[in-house]
Image: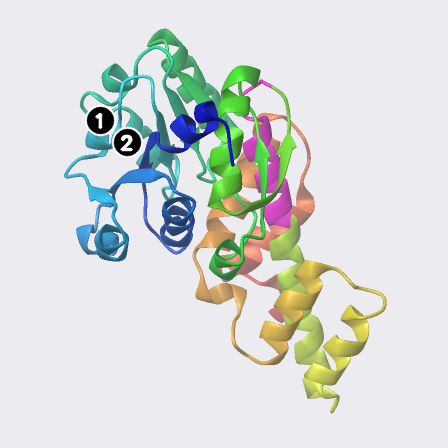
Amino acid sequence: MGTSEEVIFMRENIGFIGLGLLGLPIAANLLQAGYTLTVYNRTADKAVPLVAQGALQAAHPADCVTAGGIVVTLVWDDEALESVVRSEDFLERLGPGGIHVSMSTVSPDMGRKLADLHARHGSVYVEAPIFGRPEAAIARQLWIPVAGPQEAKERVRPVLEAMGAKGIFDFGEEAGTAVLVKLIGNFLIVSAARSLEEALGMAERGGVDPKAAVNMLTSTLFAAPIYQSYGKMIAEKSTTISQSKIPQKDVSLFLAAAQNAQFPAPLAGLLLDMLEGGDRSRH
């Protein structure tokens, strides 16, 4: 049995904004862990399963915020995230001692911009983007890099664990670092998925069973979770990277970050060209 301090902490209300494919199971994990939630989603109907489990539904993003509390955002992009933070009364309600945990995949520049904005209002911005698909969230197998002030990271760590984090990796206090790690990881994931599509397509064209090929390769030379999971899905034709808008968005963010850092990233440029439909290998 936990201490009285732990019990009180677990009863803290968490605001949660963004109930997409990842947001919904992560928020459900928090409810199952004993937290109380106030949730908001632009499409209100997505909150129905959580309300049925005891969550409160907010009419506006700022209604998820409590003074000195913790509010989590998991939205699509820079524009959506900044819109939430600058919405009426969001920063004013959060105030001194309040923590905003951003789990969105956004640009490092946006992370730094919002960290500065929070600091001017006495609140704290913590980056905690997520590695993991919805099924990984349900299985509590998420990997989360974090960045932000140390005291705030310590306070939100139990919340991240309750969300389903299998591992939490600290990248210091400077905003922008955790989301850069996320962009790097997503660039590698998309690169691997695109390579698998091409390789297994070649296997099939050459008369080789793609499932047999990927089983052999991902149990020997490429025995890594990304190759195994995406290889299986691609071999079974249950997914292609062209089915989602996420790869193009995230590779664009990676390439923009590289350009801002004056770092050459020719592979990212080629990959983005492929994702946008200009696959040079087909010409």
Q: Residues within 10 Å of mark 1 (few under 14, many from 20)?
A: few
Mark 1 residue element: loop
Q: Which residue is drawn at 62% across and 26% down?
A: 261
The residue tagged 1 is 87
View extreme (left): residue: 59
Q: State whether residue 240 is above or below residue 89.
A: below
- Residue 31 on the magenta segment: no
Would you say the residues marked 1 and 2 are in contact, meaning their CB atoms lie under 8 Å apart? yes
View extreme (front): residue: 1
Q: Which residue is drawn at 63% across and 63% down?
A: 194
Q: State whether residue 208 is above or below residue 24.
A: below
Q: Residues within 10 Å of mark 2 (few under 14, many from 20)?
A: some
The residue tagged 2 is 84
Mark 2 residue element: helix
Q: Which mark is residue 260?
A: none
- Is residue 65 found left or right of 172 in the rendered image? left
- Residue 182 on the magenta segment: yes
Cα gap from disc 1 to disc 2, whole angstroms: 5 Å
Query: Could you say which is closer to the camera, residue 11 or residue 28?
Result: 11
Q: What residue type is labelled 2?
A: Val
Q: What residue type is labelled 1?
A: Ser
Residue 269 spot, x, y in % from top left: 61, 47
Residue 71 spot, x, y in % from top left: 35, 30
Q: State whether residue 219 is above or below residue 8.
A: below
Q: What stretch is highlighted in magenta?
A: 173-187
Q: Residue at x 30, y 39 (%)?
A: 37
View extreme (right): residue: 220
Which quadrant of the figure contains the C terminus? Answer: bottom right
Residue 15 spot, x, y in % from top left: 31, 34
- Is residue 155 found left or right of 189 in the rendered image? left
